[in-house]
Image (cartoon, grey):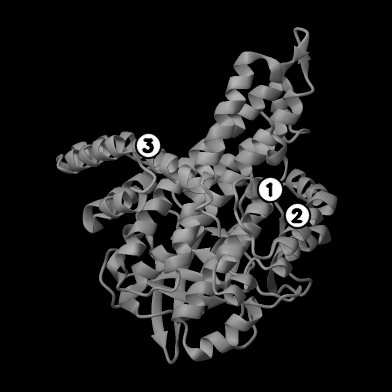
Amino acid sequence: MSYASVNTAVGFLKHLQVSIQQEPRLRDYEAWWTSQGDAISESIDRAGTPWLRMFDQWGQRIDEILYPPEYWTMLKRGYRAGAVWSCFEDKSPLSSYLIGYVTAFHDPGLYCPYTVSLSTAIPLSKYGTPELRARFLEPMLRRDDSAWQGATWMTEAKGGSDLGANVETTARPIGDRWLLTGEKYFASNAGAELAVVAARPETAPPGVRGLALFLLPKYKSDGTLNYYIRRMKNKIGTRSVPTGEVELKGSEAFLLGKAEWGIYLILEVLNLSRVANSVGSVALTQRAISEAWTFASQRVAFGRTISDHPLLKKQFEDRWAGLKLAFALAWESVQLLDEVWQEIPPLSDRHHLFRLVTHLAKYWTAEFAAQTAKWEMEVHGGMGTLAEYSAERWFREAMILAVWEGPAHRQILDGLEVMQRKHAHRLLWKHLEKWAEGRELKEIQEHVEQYLALEPARQEADAEILFRHLARFAGQCLLKKYESGEGSI
């Protein structure tokens, strides 16, 4: 079989019959990566954690993140290509996620700033007042190098999964704004001009129902810093996104939507990122398979290239099939998001279906990416473990994708919750029935209903077995959809 289509991101999308509205623009962006971006990306990764300049020479806090100029060239190229503005021009997020796919094929970490910027712009556009939109949305939608960046800060030192218990940042109203006090322990895209932040109004009840979502600018109305960066995180990968610890000290912020909608808005923001995580995981998987094939088709052992040895040949066939299944799951979450991204609470059944597919996709694609990146290192042998070559980088990057926006167990438990409370599994059967084999569909329907009748502790203990089965079944059905051409945009 030919793996020619696996060597470029756009080539793979075209192989799966994904129709791209702005294909020339996407190919131009990909060409930039090939000619310039890859070298910059490799250099940034090797440089490691960026420096933080906390004070200027007069002792004033400036909290400036010190990347080399080439980093900003690389970063701004994606904003100009439409990582954020295309969503609003097209009235659809599809183009944004296609740009994300190409980005993640070359640099998975860089896709994070684009993701969290989009995840800031969308709730601002939906839930911000006209005054907030006029003031803050326009800079985010610029098409030149002056475009503002966004960030999504939810996680505190105690962890991110149990937001109701672990978010200790408080919000106090004052006039038309709120003052936030607290800290965010994993603040990706630190230094952004805007962030959406989870906090608890002082009079709100405990638990997740008491949380609200706020828009936090980088600067106060008097021009001084509105948040402070305590330090930069030294991560194993995604070094092209600056992650820091952020301190909020009476920081000015603006409530988005209704306070009682807070948890729904927070989950909306997280799910936008989970979709992106799935897209990025598939792109990284494709890159790992591509580089493994290039190496294996040239490395000679025992008289022939190792790609011609039956065992490795079969492994390539399995990875190729797995890549297509993972893409089908990830892209279905994008397609469903395209239908529901403008909804506001109360949410429709279609939105509950989107949630379940997104949890399945995030769970499956991140795990498959990590396993494939590990396998690529094995294909390269000892060379795959050396930092001077790229195989070990894709493994480092994949391990972060596996935990970003909730690791496997979080996706499983959240998926279980939407099945229990919203019967999303029944919506999924209806969605898949056109491409499902009748007997298999009936069997999994019966299996899921029996599982949901178990007592809670047993349900949770057996949840991963069920979720893995459900993700594979959904992916196999959806792959038929895409291979038939019915999944094209």
Label 3: element kind: helix
Choose mark 1 or mark 3, whichever is in front.
Answer: 1
Question: Above or below — where is 430 with respect to 89?
Answer: above
Gap in angstroms between the C-alphas marked 1 and 3? 27 Å
Residue 31 placement (x, y as % from top left): 80, 54
Query: Is there a contact, CB below 8 Å, between mark 2 and mark 3?
Result: no
Name which residue lies at 51% across and 79% down: 125
Name which residue lies at 72% across and 56% down: 51
First of labels 1, 3 by sequence position: 1
Q: Which kind of residue does numbered mark 3 sit on?
A: Arg
**Residue furthest to the right:** 35
10 Å neighbourhood of mark 1: few (<14), some, or many (≥20)? Answer: many
Marker disc for residue 30: 2
Label 1: element kind: helix
In the picture, measured across the screen, residue 60 lies left or right of residue 346, that is right
Q: Which kind of residue does numbered mark 2 sit on?
A: Glu
Query: Is there a contact, CB below 8 Å, between mark 1 and mark 2?
Result: yes
Q: Which kind of residue does numbered mark 1 sit on?
A: Ala
The quarter of the image holding the N terminus is top right
Label 2: element kind: helix
Can residue 245 be seen here? The reply is: yes
First of labels 2, 3 by sequence position: 2
Marker disc for residue 9: 1
Residue 304 placement (x, y as % from top left): 76, 12
Nearest the viewer among 414 and 428 is 428
First of labels 1, 2 by sequence position: 1
Marker disc for residue 468: 3
In the picture, measured across the screen, residue 41 lies left or right of residue 276, that is right
Residue 282, by quadrant, is top right
10 Å neighbourhood of mark 3: few (<14), some, or many (≥20)? Answer: some
